[in-house]
Amino acid sequence: MRFIVTVVSLILAWAAVAQAEEGLQDYRQHLPLTLSGEGPWYRVELPMAVYYAAEHGDLRDLRVFNGQGQAMAYALLPGQRESRDEEQEHGVRWFPLYGDTEQGGVPRLRVQRNTDGTLIELSDEQPTQTQRQLRGWLLDASAIDAPLVRLNLNWSGGEEGFQRFTIEASDDLQHWRSWGDGQVARLSFADERIDQRQVELPGEPARYLRLLWRSPQQAPQLDVVTLRSRRQASSPAPLVWSEPLEGKAGAYGHYQWQLPQALPLERLRIALDEPNTLAPVWFTARTREQEPWQALASGVFYRLPQEGREVRQDELALPGWPVRQLSLRVDARGGGLGSQAPRLQLAVRATQLVFLARGEPPYQLALGRAGAGSAALPITTLIPGYQPERLAELPKAEVAVDALQVSAPAASAAAPRNWQRWGLWALLLVGVAMLALMAASLLKKSDPS
């Protein structure tokens, strides 16, 4: 019995180790990596040729090996849409607001505006004989179509010290909402002067601002007023483009392209070689040859003169579906794209590989294993304490795509691994059978009858 247990344990342990083993020889493509800079982490911008060499469009079969054949820890970072804040400084017009010195309160206004809301004239409704006092200022921000984040005031006159005022916002000069208080300051001491000119705003849009001094009799005269706006801008995710691909011409105006594998395409581009080209187009695609064609994208390609310059539209955005076969139909009424099949470029979302170099070079990128599963780690696991801005600081490594093997792998190359896989399954089944026999024997011995 001890012998059976020992044999079964050895079989299962050896099978598990053999199943977990993964070597460079299991991958069809081996691409050398050239490292530069001090590691230990390196980043690689993956070109389109790497996607072509992989067995899966999501690069699940990608690995990195060192000179001793050991697999390196790595992470894959797909390119993401980037958002950023853009600020802009605007000079604005301002109008004085007068109030009755005896009654105080908010001045009443008579306003004239043009069609786009810009103030033409602003006057108060107080009688001319009434003693008036400057109560504040009205700022015309109607030309700014972004949230306001900062007010900058430059002034002359007035007393030194701190000047406080209320800030109100409106879109129609009738209804006002409070934006809190503001304060500017001018202090002098020993031939030194300190000016505090900036006031933070809540980051909301408004067409008009009203500033009312807390102490009008001490308020200064404004010389320059600027407003700073901030809007959030975004840029599309970075793409990696293929080399131009020659298509296969079918019936008139029909063309097809075959990709090495199904790729999640984000964009395509057609070379328009002839001027004065106009071509309505329809693209269909499929992942496998047996599947029906599905509508992918449509549009109008053109290369035309306009106002003394040439304008062109030669790209189409795609939904990111996996595509292996692509078909183009050109509307003949536009004159077509020429007698030859057009050259097509395809783009997928750019991906960066980050790996932890360990052991001795040469380091190699391995691809092309049909049954492989992803071994990528989260970037926060690969680099403890990772921050996105750190990515650009990592030294680069270059992948030599010239080493790609264009021809398909021979069937005999996969045979040893297939034999080993079946052998492992056979050993596992033998081990299970021996465990079952052992259990039956134990049950028989424990049976009181």
Image: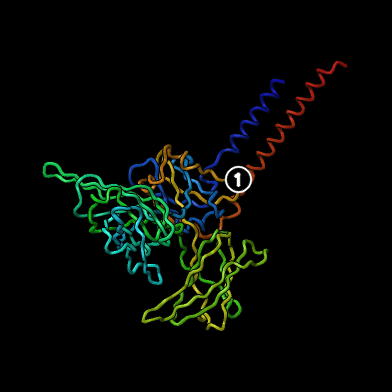
- Residue at the spot of label 1: 417
Quadrant occupied by the N terminus? top right
Q: Is residue 328 left or right of residue 68?
A: right
User: Considering depth in this image, is 174 or 5 the residue closer to the camera?
Assistant: 174
Residue found at x 65% / y 31%: 11
Q: Is residue 167 left or right of residue 1?
A: left
Question: Residue 237, image x and y in percent?
Answer: 46, 57
Question: Residue 421, image x and y in percent?
Answer: 64, 42
Residue found at x 80% / y 21%: 443
SS at mark 1 in the image: helix
Residue found at x 60% / y 48%: 371
Residue found at x 72% / y 32%: 432
| Structural crowding at the residue carrying mark 1, measured as other residues with C-alpha within 10 Å and reported as few (<14), some (14–19) or many (≥20) | few
* Residue 47 visible: yes
Does residue 73 sit above or below 439 in this rendering?
A: below
Q: Residue furthest front?
A: 129
**Which amino acid type is marked by label 1?**
Arg
